[in-house]
Amino acid sequence: MTDPMTNAERLAALLDGRLDPQRRDELLGELAASEDDFDAYAAAVAITAELEGATPEVTPIHAAPSRRRGLAPRWLALAAVLAGSALAPWRWTRFAADRGDLVAVEAGALPPGWDASPWGTTRGAGDPLTPEARAVRLGARVVDVELAVRGLDPATAQLATETAMLLEGIPGAAPAASIYREVSRRAGEPAEALEPLLRDGREVVPQLAGEERVRLGAWIESARIAAATRDRGFFASRATRSQLERMARDPSLPPAARSAAARIQAEVGSGAGVDWAVMDRDLALVLRVLGG
């Protein structure tokens, strides 16, 4: 990007959403590769915000993290732009801080022999995932990867790779997929070493795939793990009861998912001993229906 006039026109077209997909991806690739170019983009965004009366909060990018890691803050902002969900980077938020952690369960590892894919076989090219189903699967995978990392699980690399593949099915989400490609490559390292990557994943996945369904998938997977580990505290919590009530009444969910949520709700509120086998079955059913 050497011609100032051309640069200004291209940045304006990017901000206005007037670039075709190929030209947009080319420009965003240039921005991501150059600190100076991204600074120019951030300045353009800030000026636009001022003109529109908004308060810009552009993510700082002056630190120079490792290029190999590919997770400079500018990449996260660019991923949001590519998804068409945040043309203004100042709207980038920390979901973990504002809305609670995606990983709601306290387990330190995945249960032994964990079935991470209750939705069954992979779909063919003629039967692609809906955006909602992809988001639910991504939410579940975020939980699986984090617990696999915590427990140094041999399945870490495979789970992280599957997460990256799901992200790569979203237009422009390659920068986010690189987070989980890196987790896969570094599988077996201590959880503390991989936490920055996992934190970035928790932030970017809801932005790209759709916060509501990603969080729903993450909660269901957390509930499945809580049931498998017989975590009574998880199901006794007010948050769990509220979530089950919302799911049982949500008209946007398929009837089979609502019915299963209602059965789980009744099981939790019965006051009798929990039938964990029924709980396991119904939670797997909900995830299979929503992520299928």
Image (cartoon, helix red, strand yellow):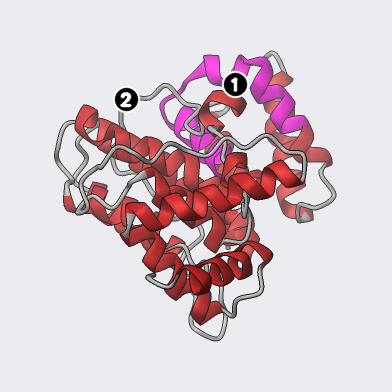
Pointer 1 local density, CA inside 10 Å: few below 14, some 14–19, many at least 20: many
- Quarter of image, res 162: bottom left
Q: Sequence-wise, which precedes: disc 2 or disc 1?
A: 2
How many residues crowd mark 2 within 10 Å: few (<14), some (14–19), many (20+)?
few
Which span is picked out in magenta?
217-245
Nearer to us in this view, 173 or 231: 173
Labelled disc at residue 235: 1
Res 287 visible: no
Q: Quadrant of residue 239?
A: top right
Amino acid type shown at disc 1: Phe
What amino acid type is highlighted by mark number 2? Gly
The residue at 43%/49% (across/down) is 39
**Is 226 contained in the magenta span?**
yes
Camera-side residue: 184 or 222?
184
Disc 2 secondary structure class: loop
Above or below for 123 versus 281: below
- Pinpoint residue 35: horizontal percent, then vertical percent: 34, 52
Look at the numbered disc 1 and give the secondary structure of its residue: helix
Provide residue 273's location: percent of width, then percent of height: 60, 17
Name the residue that disc number 2 marks: 108
Going 74% across and 46% down the picture, which residue do you hit?
51
Does 95 appear above or below 158? above
Q: Measured along the vertical axis of the image, is residue 229 above or below residue 262?
A: above
Magenta region includes residue 171: no
In space, the residues marked 2 and 1 are separated at their CA atoms by 17 Å
Circles 2 and 1 in contact, beta carbons < 8 Å: no
Q: Where is residue 215, by image quadrant?
A: top right
